[in-house]
Image: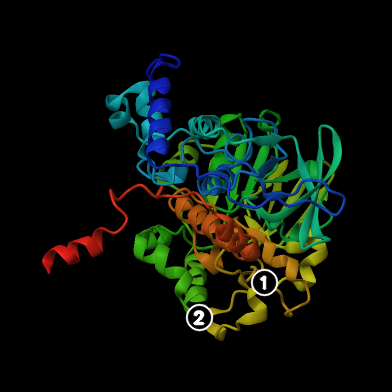
């Protein structure tokens, strides 16, 4: 990596971004009438839960449209929001470097502009894929240059209805438990934002000292000299296997249910504007068909991730080997697969995430009222996939809908801007390629709803508006038209 000349290039870039926004007359002035709670306490127009890539893009989109009264909360310490420095363990991003990510149409806000401002165009041309920690550096800069007011170390415990059509957000932070009142809440909570890591039933009763999910913090140094197993063969499985091998694992076996590794990323074939903008307007059957097909085909691990593992002679890939059971004998695990038992010291589950609303304390109490896909759509038998049925059935602005109309109207003020929105709106709320599109849809939807909710106030403000354009002295004489008519006679 070329040496950085600290601040010199970025300072000029930041001035260009400031000028870009000035030319666009953005952010707009605050136009939302202030609200107060029943005891006179201030009300936030929007609370964004999560300050990873999606949360930052959502917040910036809202501010550009004049939503200034917002708060952005994240449980992580500053600089560790999202997965990039926690459970993401690939060396580089999987997305091509040319994708514009959360730049929201501003060329100078792209990763490329940030990179070239520091290292130059030759270094950009030489760059293969973006190093994962560097993407986090870019997002931290994105937050800073846009002045997004993130509050770190604040964990949202519960969200529920409050008096006056508001939402009450209970948040635990450095100063203790606080209850915020908000008109809208955005859950920008990432891949597990409406559920959590999926742990297969065969792990029931196995003590945690013997295993971890790939989303957990893992002490890879402790795996040196140990026999390690990994369940799965997706990108995350390969990344965790690579980490264990590089830490000195004595042996590593990847247990893969499928008889082969998928080679084609089907979702790449849908990465064009037609799919992005057309998907939300499809009927339920077509939306289900597309996403179910992509999930059934699975996404292959990147080539370089596989090679990261395969170059180690102590690594084995066992295809067509589903795990049937796991038990503890003394200080080792016995993993049962068809016709064989494998003895291990530690097992890593790269088994993905599931949508499971009761696991989310913020909204678990409202699960019975939330409309899910299985409540609205029954696929043909050949397209059945029960886990898809658990996804929330969302409105066009990522808002939750009621399972029974009138039962929980406050759900319309709660917006699901995370992975769980994929079935309803497409891949616009979690991955790099189309996050700007999703953030704009979200912000425009919230702005529209806030305007309509205050319609009477805006009508009255329009009637009161009295800034005169004409001052009364624009014509040299008051009866010009009549005098011209007299001259023609």
Q: Nearer the viewer, mark 2 or mark 1?
A: 1
Q: Quadrant of the C terminus?
A: bottom left
Name the image quarter holding residue 481.
bottom left
Quarter holding the N terminus? Answer: top left
Question: In x, y percent, where is residue 334?
Answer: 75, 51
Residue 250 located left or right of residue 428: right
Is any part of residue 110 visible from this angle? no
Residue 14 or residue 98, whichever sits in front: 14
- With 449 as the anchor, is 145 left or right in this view? left
Seen in the image, is 206 located left or right of residue 17?
Answer: right
Residue 71 placement: quadrant: top right
Residue 441 visible, this orientation: yes
Whole-number angstrom distance, CA of label 2 to CA of label 1: 19 Å
Q: Secondary structure at mark 1?
A: loop
Q: Which residue is mark 2?
A: 285
Name of the residue lying farthest toward the left: 488
Residue 26: percent from the left, percent from the top? 46, 42
Where does the image place residue 23, in percent across and percent down from the top left? Answer: 37, 38
Q: Nearer the viewer, residue 7 or 122?
A: 7
Which residue is pictured at 55% across the width and 49% down the height? 62
Residue 69: x and y in percent read 65, 44
Q: Name which residue lies at 54% across and 41% down.
A: 239
SS state under label 2: helix
Q: Residues within 10 Å of mark 1 (few under 14, many from 20)?
A: many
Name the residue beneath numbered marker 1: 401
């Amino acid at each position: 990596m070329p040496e950085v000349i600290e601040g010199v290039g970025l300072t000029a870039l930041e001035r260009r971004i400031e000028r870009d926004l000035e030319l666009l007359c953005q952010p707009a002035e605050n136009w939302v009438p202030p609200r107060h709670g029943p005891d006179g306490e201030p009300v936030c127009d929007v609370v964004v839960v999560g300050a990873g890539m999606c949360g930052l893009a959502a917040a910036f989109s809202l501010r550009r449209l004049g939503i200034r009264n917002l708060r952005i909360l994240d449980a992580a310490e500053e600089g560790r929001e999202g997965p990039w420095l926690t459970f993401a363990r690939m060396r580089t991003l999987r997305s091509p470097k040319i994708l514009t990510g959360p730049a929201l149409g501003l060329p100078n806000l792209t990763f490329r502009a940030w990179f070239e401002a520091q290292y130059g165009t030759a270094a950009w041309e030489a760059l293969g894929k973006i190093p994962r920690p560097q993407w986090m550096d870019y997002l931290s800069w994105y937050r800073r240059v846009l002045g997004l007011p993130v509050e770190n170390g604040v964990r949202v415990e519960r969200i529920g209805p409050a008096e006056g059509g508001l939402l009450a957000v209970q948040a635990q932070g450095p100063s203790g438990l606080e209850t915020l009142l908000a008109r809208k809440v955005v859950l920008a909570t990432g891949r597990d934002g409406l559920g959590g890591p999926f742990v297969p039933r065969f792990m029931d009763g196995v003590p945690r000292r013997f295993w971890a999910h790939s989303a957990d913090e893992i002490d890879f140094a402790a795996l040196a000299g140990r026999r390690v197993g990994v369940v799965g063969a997706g990108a995350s499985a390969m990344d965790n296997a690579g980490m264990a091998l590089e830490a000195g694992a004595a042996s590593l076996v990847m247990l893969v249910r499928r008889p082969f590794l998928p080679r084609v990323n089907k979702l790449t074939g849908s990465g064009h504007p037609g799919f992005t903008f057309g998907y939300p307007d499809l009927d339920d059957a077509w939306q289900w068909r597309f996403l179910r097909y992509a999930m059934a085909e699975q996404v292959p691990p990147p080539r370089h991730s596989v090679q990261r593992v395969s170059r180690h002679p102590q690594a084995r890939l066992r295809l067509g080997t589903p795990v049937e059971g796991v038990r503890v004998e003394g200080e080792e695990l016995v993993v049962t697969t068809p016709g064989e038992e494998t003895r291990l010291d530690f097992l890593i589950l790269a088994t993905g995430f599931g949508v499971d609303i009761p696991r989310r304390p913020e909204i678990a109490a409202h699960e019975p009222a939330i409309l899910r896909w299985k409540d609205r759509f029954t696929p043909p038998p050949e397209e059945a996939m029960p886990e898809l049925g658990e996804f929330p059935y969302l409105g066009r602005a990522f808002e939750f809908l009621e399972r029974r109309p009138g039962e929980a109207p406050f759900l319309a003020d709660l917006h699901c801007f995370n992975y769980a929105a994929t079935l309803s709106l497409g891949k616009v709320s979690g991955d790099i390629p189309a996050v700007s599109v999703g953030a704009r849809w979200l912000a425009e939807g919230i702005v529209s709803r806030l305007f309509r909710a205050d319609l009477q106030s805006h009508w009255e403000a329009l009637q009161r508006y009295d800034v005169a354009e004409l001052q009364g002295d624009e014509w040299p004489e008051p009866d010009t038209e009549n005098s011209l008519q007299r001259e023609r006679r």
